[in-house]
Amino acid sequence: MKVVLLGTGGPRPDPRRNASTTLIRCGEENILFDAGRGVVVQLVKAGVPLTALNPVFITHHHFDHIGDLYDLMLATWLAGRKGPLKIYGPSETTRIVNALITQVYDKDIYWRDKGEPTLGGWPPLEVQDILPGPVVDTGRWRVRAELVNHGDGLGMPASFMPRWTCLGYRFEAEGKTVAISGDTIPCAGLDRLAEGADVLVQCCYLASEEINNEHFRRLAQHTMACAADVGRIATRAGVKTLVLTHHKTRTDQSMLDRIAEEVSRDFSGRLIMGEDLTEIDV
Ligand SMILES: [Zn+2]
């Protein structure tokens, strides 16, 4: 089993990084977590046949995590996908996918479906809005979702918050565990999904010395784990390998070095500073 970081950046364009998206390769199967900017090109670069990708688990609905979901649905079709692409995500994932295929790309789908019949017709999607708990168990691997905290304390209207569900995922196969934090600050759900993980793919946005304005202070408190948090999270959970992703756009290496120093104070296991297309054997 192998983890491949397809994207390690955030919502802001970064010449060095695509948006945060992680792939698990398990035998012949390819399981995707999120579908951010650049996902399809990154899959090709990683040597993954687009027809061998299924399913997709969405962590939340920020555009750096679903921005290229349309590309994934359409490009896997053009590549020869015959069966349904399965998509799991928090509440309203179905609404978003339906909007893409019935309101945004409906003409494109119709055009290729009717005008290029050798493509075999539009293959179905199977979308499911999920709740925290067990999601899929194939007998070969299983996935569980946990609720994580990505902005709960920002003071958004109470009427909006029930619509803002953010998930992390725990993937188990071959006696090994990979945890995908999603976007989150330290929280009980993250502790549960990371417990004893062989690999934790963890968002880590800022070094402490980058937290130098009100926006970043609020972000570090309510939105994204940062360097002072992630070593403690991994140590508390007994994680063996900690992989850091979802990096801020930066022009040089210096703050990544500072993050590694900070995290190493709290965590003595293997630390990997994620780059696009980093592969981790599990
Ligand atoms: Zn994000």
Image (tube, rainbow, N blue to C red):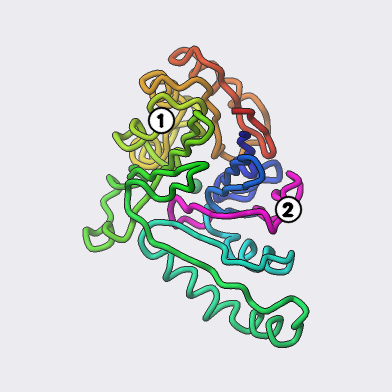
Residue depicted at 55% across the width and 35% down the height: 245
The quarter of the picture where the C terminus appears is: top right
Name of the residue lying farthest toward the left: 158
**Residue pointed to by mark 2:** 49
SS for callout 1: helix
For residue 94, above or below residue 161: below
For residue 195, above or below residue 9: above
Nearer to us in this view, 155 or 215: 155
Relative image position of residue 72 (x, y in whole percent): 63, 61
Name of the residue lying farthest toward the bottom: 114
Residue depicted at 61% across the width and 36% down the height: 3
Tag shown at residue 117: none
Decide: few, some or many residues near mark 1? Use Cα within 10 Å; few <14, some 14-19, many ≥20. Answer: many
Relative image position of residue 164 (x, y in whole percent): 33, 56
Residue depicted at 45% across the width and 43% down the height: 142
Specify the amino acid type for callout 2: Pro
Residue depicted at 71% across the width and 81% down the height: 112
Residue 4 occupies quadrant:
top right
What is the span of residues highlighted in magenta in the rendered image?
A: 38-64
Q: Nearer the viewer, mark 1 or mark 2?
A: 2
For residue 12, above or below residue 230: below
